Amino acid sequence: MSRQFMKKSCLLGNQHQCMIRLSTLRYRMTRSQSPLPFIGVSLFFWIAMNFTLSHAAPAKIVLEEVKHQDKSYITLESVKNFYQFSTIHREGKKISLDQPKIKFQLSVGDQECSLNGVKFVCSDPVVEVGTHTCISRLDLQKLIEPVLRPSYIKGAGQFRTVILDAGHGGKDSGAVNAYNTEKAYNLTVAQQVKKTLTAKGFRVIMTRESDTYLSLQERVDIANAVKDSAVFISIHFNAGGRSARGIETFTLSPAGVAHYGRASRESDAQEIQGNQNDSANIALATAVHGQLRVRLGANTYDRGIKRARYSVLTGVKHPAILVEGGFMSHPYESRLIQNPKYLEAVSRGISDAVLLYRRAVTPRTNQTAP
Ligand SMILES: [Zn+2]
């Protein structure tokens, strides 16, 4: 049985129009080539860069909820109407909701979805309930809504402090390969981002400024000692099997969602400190991940935005993400990472994203309370 519901805050429908600007960055590198210079990109990427409210009385659009195995799901047909997608198209298991500027792709039985090509790992797979195809209510509220309508995230735009956490340090090298250590790459990127954001008028706090060891709790404590509004970005590079490559961005799992790749635990059900920023967390992750894709282009592979329970994400009171800028264990990608231009592209992607995020989450002047 289905019933309709109206979420009391940001899911109420208004006539709106989403607009994006997509980068047209085009360059490629083959395995046989040495790393090429990275070109600058002036265009920003955001799923819903801007939207305007109609002065006409908004149509009352409701999201249709259905129950499936004791969980709440929302029909994609009502998602289409609510977010004013013009079409919904299905071919086999693949579904696409389209507006002139937004392409939302999902697949039945799959947890991955994409918005304008940016990959997200949802909390639940897309399911079929009776004649309806549905996305979980949790994913709609905690992922789709803040990404499509970032300016409705309460209070998120009021910050001028950025906390940069260069992962590892001192006796903890992080990943190590024939070229360098992860702790060194992390610090280089953090220092470059600091320089750029400071020049843009931000106050930048670093958890470490040199090759020193800090426990995870010390990083959390430094971040939480920042009393004014801030965002927290933890910078890392990855290691894994020899074929693993690409970028991935982590943000805290909403209550009830496990750490990526592991079975859920009883404690996952609890709302914790970082969950106060669920909407801002995913919006910040989207900005950073999207900008890294723009800056790195064909030199990277998109592993997606994922949910995790790393201690810096669970304990920091500010919107927080952890970004992995590539795999030091991949033979080709390790050479790329060793190239200063690659690190610079990662740094510029993060810096661009902070500016973009702040602009995207700042309420529009003609915006009424949702
Ligand atoms: Zn690391």
Image (spheres, grey):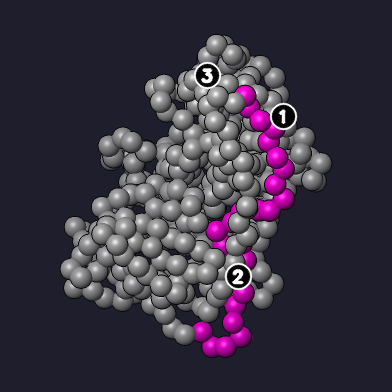
Looking at the rendering, the stretch of residues picked out in magenta corresponds to 34-58
Q: Is mark 1 within 8 Å of ligand 1?
A: no
Main secondary-structure element of the magenta-colored stretch: loop
Residue 100 part of the magenta-drawn span? no
| Circle 2 Cα neighbour tier, 10 Å, few/some/many (<14 / 14–19 / ≥20) | many
Residue 164 visible somewhere in the drawing: no
Q: Is residue 323 left or right of residue 204?
A: left
Q: Position of residue 243 (x, y in %)?
A: 41, 25
Give coordinates of residue 222: x percent, y percent: 63, 32
The amino acid type of the residue labelled 3 equals Gly
Other-residue count near label 3 (Cα within 10 Å), few / some / many at <14 / 14–19 / ≥20: some
Q: Is residue 46 magenta?
A: yes
The type of residue carrying mark 1 is Gln
Taking the image as drawn, is residue 29 in sight?
yes
Does the beta carbon at disc 3 come under 8 Å from ligand 1?
yes
**Quadrant in the rendering for residue 1:** bottom left
> Element under label 3?
loop
- Residue linked to disc 1: 191
* Spot occupied by residue 305 in the image (x, y as percentages of width and height): 46, 44
Mark 3–mark 2 Cα distance, whole angstroms, equals 42 Å
Query: Residue at the spot x=34%, y=61% of the render?
Result: 95
Quarter of the image for residue 215 reads top right
Residue 170 against residue 269 in the figure, above or below: above
Mark carried by residue 91: none
Residue denoted by label 3: 174
Q: Which residue is mark 2?
A: 51
Is 146 situated above or below 284? below
